[in-house]
Image (cartoon, rainbow, N blue to C red):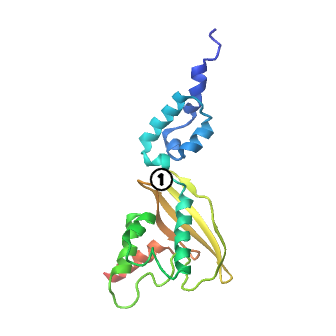
C-alpha cells in the first residue's frame, strides 16, 4: 500500500514543476495544455496562481499581436490617406500601443509648435519618408520576464530592413517601449537626443 500511487497527488503533481515566475509568462490556455491539467481542483489552483500575477495576465495577448495590430491600422491609414496613430489628435491611440515614456515623447513631438521639423519627420514604423514595402513579416516574440522583443522584417524599395520592437508587460497587456532600427539607432534614442539638444 505504501508504494501505491495516490490519484490525487498524481493529478496535481505537474504544478510542482512550475514556478510562479514561469506561470506568469504563460497564457492561461497554454499553461493548461502544457501541464495537462484535467481536474477542477488543479484548474482552480492555477487560477489562484494567475491572480498573484495580476488578473490581466490571463487575458494578455502575445506581444507580437500588438505589433501586428499597429501595422494593420497604420497600413490602412496610409491607403486611406489618414493617420489615427501619429496625427497628434488622438492620445488614446498612442497609449494603446506605447508605454508612457514613449507615448509622452511622441505626443509632445506631434503637438508642440517649433521652428523646423520635429523628430518625426519620417515614418517610424518603416524608418523612411517614402516606402514601397514587400516581404513584410512579424516574428514571434522572444519573452524574458516582463520584457519582450519582436522582430519586424521587410524590404523597402529593394533594401532589406529589420526593426526590433522592445516591449514591456504592463497592466493591461504589452506596450512598445522602443523601436530599434537596422543601423543601430532607435526611436527612443532620437527623442532623448532631441531633448538634450533643446535644453
In the image, residue 87 sits, relative to residue 12, either above or below, namely below
Q: Quadrant of the N terminus?
A: top right
- Characterize the local packing of mark 1: few (<14), some (14-19) or many (20 or more) Cα atoms within 10 angstroms: few
Q: Quadrant of the C terminus?
A: bottom left
Residue at 40%, 65% (x, y): give it.
95
* Left or right of 152, for residue 50: left
**Nearer the observer, 82 or 16:** 82
Residue at 50%, 83% (x, y): give it.
122
In the image, residue 42 sits, relative to residue 136, either above or below, namely above
Residue at the bottom extreme of this rendering: 116
Residue 184 visible here: no
* Left or right of 85, for residue 143: right
In the image, residue 102 sits, relative to residue 126, either above or below, namely above
Q: Tell me the quarter of the picture where residue 13 sits.
A: top right
Residue at 56%, 80% (x, y): give it.
79
Residue 97, horizontal then vertical, whole percent:
46, 65
Which residue does the numbered mark 1 point to in the structure image? 146
In the image, residue 125 sits, relative to residue 122, either above or below, namely above
Residue 181, horizontal then vertical, whole percent:
55, 74
**Nearer the observer, 129 or 59:** 59
Residue at 55%, 60% (x, y): give it.
65
Residue 18, horizontal then vertical, whole percent:
55, 37
Q: Tell me the quarter of the picture where residue 130 sits.
A: bottom right
Residue 4 visible here: yes
Residue at the front extreme of this rendering: 80
Q: Tell me the quarter of the picture where residue 155 sits.
A: bottom right
Amino acid at each position: 500500500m505504501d508504494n501505491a500511487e495516490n490519484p490525487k497527488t498524481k493529478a496535481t503533481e505537474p504544478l510542482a514543476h512550475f514556478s510562479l515566475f514561469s506561470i506568469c509568462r504563460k497564457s492561461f490556455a497554454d499553461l493548461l495544455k502544457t501541464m495537462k491539467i484535467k481536474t477542477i481542483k488543479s484548474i482552480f489552483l492555477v487560477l489562484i496562481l494567475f491572480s498573484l500575477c495580476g488578473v490581466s495576465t490571463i487575458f494578455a495577448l502575445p506581444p507580437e499581436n500588438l505589433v501586428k495590430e499597429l501595422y494593420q491600422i497604420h497600413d490602412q491609414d496610409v491607403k486611406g490617406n489618414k493617420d489615427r496613430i501619429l496625427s497628434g489628435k488622438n492620445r488614446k491611440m498612442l497609449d494603446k500601443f506605447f508605454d508612457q515614456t514613449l507615448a509622452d515623447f511622441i505626443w509632445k513631438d506631434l503637438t508642440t509648435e517649433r521652428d523646423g521639423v520635429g523628430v518625426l519627420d519620417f515614418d517610424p514604423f518603416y524608418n523612411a519618408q517614402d516606402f514601397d514595402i514587400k516581404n513584410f513579416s512579424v516574428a514571434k516574440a522572444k519573452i524574458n520576464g516582463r520584457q519582450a522583443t519582436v522582430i519586424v522584417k521587410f524590404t523597402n524599395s529593394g533594401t532589406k530592413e529589420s526593426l526590433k520592437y522592445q516591449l514591456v508587460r504592463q497592466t493591461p497587456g504589452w506596450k512598445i517601449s522602443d523601436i530599434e532600427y537596422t543601423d543601430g539607432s532607435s526611436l527612443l534614442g532620437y527623442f532623448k537626443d532631441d531633448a538634450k539638444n533643446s535644453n
